[in-house]
Amino acid sequence: HRLVKYVLKHGSWFELLITISCKTGFLSVILCDSHDYVLVQERTFWKEARDFCRKHYIDLATVQTDEEWIELNKIRAKYGSKTWIGLYDDVNSWRWSFLNECPTYARWDTNQPDNYGGDQDCVMLHSNGYWHDEDCDLKCFFFVCKIPCKYFYFRECCNCFWVLILNQPKLHQPEKRWISTEYN
């Protein structure tokens, strides 16, 4: 992984963690911006939400930074609903459904998790933005999916790269063409 700074035509910078692999003079870059989410406005059980996200996107949303938590809450607040995220209790240890990882970040509400009734094994963003454990079999929440990574292809040019192809049209805006990159 490398931290790369991208310069937009208008001069602003943004940083992204990327994975780079070389192939005959071209660099294939898999870019994962952690803020790529989509809210699905369908009330469903947690497992159905997870299965839908896995089929159509990547998985239910994960939250590993304050920035991701803020972004998810912007999405949730726009529709004023509680939403399922990808955290669940797997035999007394919380895990993200994506890659079955243990969480390294948490935003539990006061007195949460409480496992009220003994069967609250899934997590939702409450209307106040904080995490609550909840019964996975409740069919009353929207859910947030993590969107797949974007793929970029670069040609190496000394210490800079020039974008040749961008396969995600929603990111490509002619007035904001990629100019160059610089390594940290």
Image: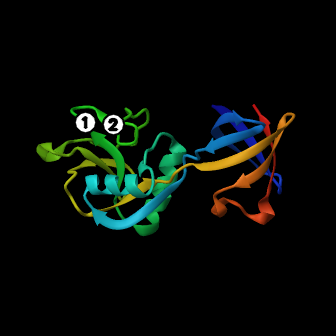
Q: Are the residues at dot 2 and dot 1 in contact (C-beta closer than 8 Å)?
A: yes
Query: For the point 77% across and 33% down, which residue is it?
Result: 183
* Residue 32 coordinates in the image, percent (x, y): 58, 45
User: Observer-nearest residue: 51 or 64?
Assistant: 51
Q: Is residue 134 visible?
A: yes
Q: Specify the quadrant of the image occupied by residue 40.
A: bottom left
Residue designated by label 2: 95
Residue designated by label 1: 90
Instruction: Work out whether mark 2 precedes mark 1 in sequence or the reverse, and give the earlier one.
Output: 1
User: Observer-nearest residue: 148 or 124?
Assistant: 148
Which residue type does callout 2 highlight?
Arg
Query: For the point 27% across and 47% down, which residue is it?
Result: 122
Image: 78 above or below 107: below
Which residue type does callout 1 highlight?
Asp
Taking the image as shown, residue 77 lies to the left or right of residue 47, namely right
User: Observer-nearest residue: 2 or 142?
Assistant: 2
Circle 2 SS class: strand
The C terminus - image quarter: top right
* Residue 148 coordinates in the image, percent (x, y): 52, 51
Which residue is farthest left? 117
